[in-house]
Amino acid sequence: MLHVDLDEFLAAVEVARRPELKGRPVVVGGAGDPTLRAVVATASYEARTYGIRSGMPLKTAARLCPDAVFLPSDPPVYEEVSERVMDALRRLPVVVEVLGWDEAFLGTTTTRPEVLAVQVQLAVREETGLSCSVGIGDTRLRAKIATGFAKPAGTFRLSRHNWSDVMGDRPTDALWGVGGKTAKKLADMGITTVRELAAADPADLAGRFGPKMGPWFRMLAFGAGDTRVTADPYVPRSRSREVTFQRNVTDRSELDEHLVALAKRVAEDVVEEDRPVVRVGVKVRFAPFFTHTRSVGLAAPTRSAADIEAAARTALDRFDPDELTQPVRLLGVRAEFEATG
């Protein structure tokens, strides 16, 4: 299978619209105004050389690179370009599983995957003028990780034959599915590399992470994983809305007002999606920039706006009262759908 990842997608689309920006550091996010609170959605490779990364506050990005070009996010344009890319991929002899605007898994039977990968890159470039990186693997995990070695605009194959040589000495968070917090917990157990995780005692891992997650982390260290690619349409697992405050909110009643407004918007999205919700979560980003989340399961699947609002209130109440006395810079509400299929 192949994993296709469009390089610096949002920034690349914007540069294609404004060719005069080619070669300049471009940052896309929010309203494109670094004096307002918002985060980086995508930074061009030129901007990344200054340390600018996705999720970083625009103000921080501006400090790192005052000469960067800041542009507002334009989702309808990105969706249109993404659809053109996916349609181009579907014209190839592959099964296309869309993962988002800028990435997809391709399933195929071929003895020459590198040739097919180049065909993929040519198809994307001819359709949109954009470049993409292609990871080749015998599992989804290996294909996904291989793409990181392919960037930018290259190809790379990662299989059981070279997995240990390529990945063995890398840190555990180089694995797709192991985040920073998990890596820290593994380090506390004396496990810092992929090779050490593969050699770890499954019982020790189960004792630390649980009977399912512990052994699963060890399987990731072997590069194991799903080998299926499906052309079924992408189905979102949740709908969420959030607001970044231009001034910190310190009053609980004001926070409650914003929570209700967000919950209503999420409920409208749920009605449009026409799928029942089973869990509601609340995200709070405190000043200066640390984020906590709380969530609650619902007694029964629902599409009710009142139930979603009530659950959001309950989730917010699950925060430590002392936490909510701190200045809040962002608030979000998320509704998780009942699993399908």
Image (spheres, rainbow, N blue to C red):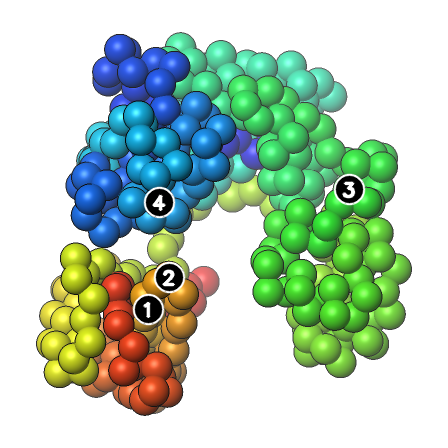
Task: Answer with left or right where residue 26 lies relative to residue 183.
Answer: left
Task: Answer with left or right where residue 244 lies relative to residue 164.
Answer: left
Q: Residue at x 79, y 36 (%)?
A: 166
Cα–Cα span, label 1 and label 4: 16 Å
Cα–Cα span, label 1 and label 3: 36 Å
Task: Identify the residue under disc 4.
Answer: 60
User: Disc 4 vs disc 3: which is toward the camera?
Assistant: 4
Cα–Cα span, label 3 and label 2: 32 Å
Task: Identify the residue under disc 2.
Answer: 289
Q: Dot 4: what SS?
A: helix
Q: Dot 1: what SS?
A: strand
Q: Dot 2: what SS?
A: loop
Cα–Cα span, label 4 and label 2: 11 Å
* Mark 2 burial class by Cα count in 10 Å: few <14, some 14-19, many 20+: few
User: Disc 1 vs disc 3: which is toward the camera?
Assistant: 1
**Residue type at mark 3?**
Met
Quadrant assignment, res 248: bottom left
Of the pair 194 and 108, the residue shown nearer to us: 194
Task: Identify the residue under disc 3.
Answer: 167
Of marks 3 and 2, which one's residue comes earlier in the chain? 3
**Residue type at mark 1?**
Phe
Q: Residue at x 43, y 23 (%)?
A: 46
Residue 69, image x, y percentages: 27, 26
Label pair 4/2, CB-CB below 8 angstroms: no
* Mark 3 burial class by Cα count in 10 Å: few <14, some 14-19, many 20+: many
**Residue type at mark 2?**
Phe
